[in-house]
Image (tube, rainbow, N blue to C red):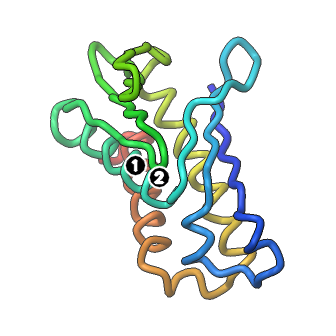
Amino acid sequence: MRMKFEIEPYEDMLDEPFEVSSYFLDRINMYIEKNNRMEEFCTSTFHSSILLDLAEGLINMYEQNQQPFVIEMYESTLEYTFTYFQKLVTVTRYEGYNGETVEMMKCRFDDFVEAFVKEYERYHKAILKQDRHAFENEHYCMMRDQINILKNHVNGVI
């Protein structure tokens, strides 16, 4: 399994110098590889919040007996529910506009977390390459801590 984050900067910010705080407001498109093709998983603005919430939910699944969690997308009526059962994570999408619920995917929990952590870490390092002062941003530091916690869970250290 593989995951990819694609960040879409706002057009009016393209000529501005890179700043972590404004970068975190940009739109994220998350893709997951299914059947050897990358498929869109979710899209939202305020991507730092989405990533922080997703990582927090996964950490809580490890630490609090697999409790389900919900992430609401910004600028849409979509909600994603992550449910753990028998070593599998099921992701369902609820469309608030029409009340439709769709099962997005079901896969091994550890595979999902491993793919997420790998891409989250790649994304985190890419930010530091653009701004050597990224560690001055609270959200950037929270992401680093979440990556370390999730890596420890995946590796069986915790």
Give the residue at x 46% y 63%. 143
Q: Which residue is mark 2?
A: 51
- Image vertical order of residue 55 relative to residue 66, above or below: below
Residue sitting farthest toward the left: 64
Q: CA distance from mark 2 to mark 1?
A: 6 Å
Decide which of 104, 145 is in the foreground and name it. 104
Q: Label 2: how many residues lie within 10 Å, few (<14), some (14-19) or many (20+)? A: some
- Looking at the rendered structure, the kind of residue marked 1 is Ala
Give the residue at x 57% y 52%. 120
Residue sitting farthest toward the front: 97
- Image vertical order of residue 43 relative to residue 129, above or below: above
Quadrant of the drawing holding the N terminus? top right
Position in image of residue 27 (x %, y %) = 61, 54
Q: Which secondary structure lies at badge 1?
A: helix
Can residue 91 be seen in this snapshot? no
Q: Which residue is mark 1?
A: 55
Give the residue at x 39% y 20%. 98
